Amino acid sequence: MIMSFCHRNRLVALMWSIALAGVAAAAPVPSTDGNAATLSAESALQRGDCGAASTLYLKASQLLAQAELAQRATAVALECGQVATALAAAERWVKLAPGDTPAALARVRAALAGFHIPEAQEYFKAWLGGADRKVPEAIDELAQGVGNEALLLMLRGLDHPALRSSAAQRALAELALESWDANAALKYAQGARTAGARSADLAALVSRAQAVLGNEPAALAAAHEAADRKDGDAGDEGALAVAQTLLLLGKSAAAEAELQRLRGDATVGTAASRQLAQLAFEQGDYALAEQRSSLLLRDPASSVLAVYLLGVIAERRGDEAAALRHYAALLDTGFDAVGRRRAAGILYRQGEHEAALRVFAPARNAGPAERIRADIAVADLLSLVDAPEESLGRIDGALRRSPGNPELDYQRAVLLERAGKIEAALKLLESLHRARPLDAAVTNALGYTLADHKRALPRAEQLIREALQSQPDSPAILDSLGWVLYRRGQAAAAVPVLARAYRLLHDGDVGAHWGEALWGAGQHAAARAAWQRALAADPDNKGLNATLAKFAPDIRAPVPPPALEAAPRTSI
């Protein structure tokens, strides 16, 4: 499974009333004067020229011995995806501010952004050598900056006393689980316990890791331990551990029964109700999902999810006006980006093409990273609505402003493949793989694209297995492995791999592959059941619907019933 930038981050954007503000262009000032370079850098940044801004800020920081300027140069280059420039600026910052934690961690982040793992390890070890290092906080900061995968690759090879505390081991366990390496998570969890940790949230983490691995007895034992402990440190996590573990194990009926039991609990009743609403939605029971979501609107912790679910139900019912109202209410919430994406899709279908694109327009004072995300979101939308050349043009424009940005390059490969330009997509993915051989997302994307187009299947499988070494439990990479096995004529071997991938991620692409492998293995009834489950969870998926048109055109997505008599008011 190859994931677009938007898919990988799950959220895309909804404020269509804000237009991009133009800024008068000013040519960069080629000068050896640091102040002039600073002014030119800011001017380039204001007009959106990330490449020039990053280079000029670096130049200014090298001419002026100001730690604050080197800090600014590093931040701009990181936001712009200018990895080499960011690393040089961070080196300058560290030189000007030796011993400064933000500078040291920025240098680590810059190395990780380029997947320069050995260098990142050396920089992190240097930082660990200082006094009073707060390792869990540093792990969290780096994960937010560069993501989990590169960070875990760096930390796997490190052994330092500061990493052996119960808090550090607990943070590493969470990082490993979020990076789809459940065995590593269990190892670190055991390390936390050896260091003295005994808590409900740690037991809940162990239960999730065991469930990811499919170890049902161990997973449920740990979940019950989490539910039974009275540490008071796990919030909802301990009490809900059994239900969440059952869901990860694919036992939705038992999970629903457990959640129903918890609905009356004064502490976690509302959280259980949220999960019940989401479960009904994912199963395609829209009447029940709408009823449950409507009851959650008055709860501040639940209303955002409720509004999103009600918006999607309205959209699938055909009430696009109501759907747009719901999505508009998601502005500046955790569902902001996905609300924007769905709203833009509606507007584009209605022929309001310019309004649809304005949905993603960043605010006037938006930083480089936000503007790049907006470009990616627009390009993704254009690709999905069959405007491939316009989509590629948008990405190419962003790359001119931020040359070499790895996220933009990756997204361009995704869009080329969608546009049917397979050779160009493979060429770009090969280039990215040479530059970032440890990046599992790139390695998997190359392997999956080869497999999906029946090219060099032995090498495709090798690449996918390499990616799986970094993220052995990733449902996206497991999907790729199952798909290449199916493409190589090994349908029976592909079925359990794809079944596990779907258990971990209820995605239409994965469901389509799982069903097709079952069909190829002669299990037609099981294939139809798999497709029906996938269609209920992801009815908008183009790949799934194409597969159904080929093998089972009679299978139809569930349709929401008419709206409730007293339509719920959108509330956040």
Image: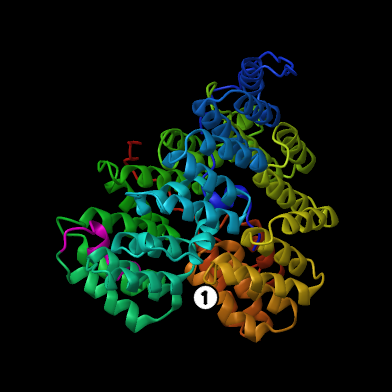
The kind of residue tagged 1 is Arg
**Which residue lies most toward the right here?**
423
* Crowding near the residue tagged with mark 1, few <14, some 14–19, many ≥20 C-alpha atoms within 10 Å: many
Q: Is residue 306 above or below residue 529?
A: above
Residue at the location (48% across, 44% down)? Answer: 104
Is residue 310 in view?
Answer: yes
Residue at the location (63% across, 39% down)? Answer: 88
Q: Quadrant of residue 566?
A: top left
Please state, as top left, top right, bottom left or bottom right, where the C terminus lies in the image: top left
What count of labels does the image hold? 1
Q: Secondary structure at mark 1?
A: helix
In this view, the residue in front, 94 or 248, is 94
Side of 46 relative to 281 (left or right) = right
**Principal secondary structure, stretch drawn in magenta:** helix
Residue 316 image offset from top left, x and y in percent? 51, 49
Residue at the location (27% across, 61% down)? Answer: 237
Residue 236 falls inside the magenta stretch: yes
Residue 137 image offset from top left, x and y in percent? 36, 49
Q: Quadrant of residue 520?
A: bottom right
Is residue 319 in view?
Answer: no
Stretch of the chain drawn in magenta: 231-244
Q: Is residue 262 above or below residue 396?
A: below
Q: Is residue 363 above or below residue 119?
A: above
What residue would you read off at disc 1? 500
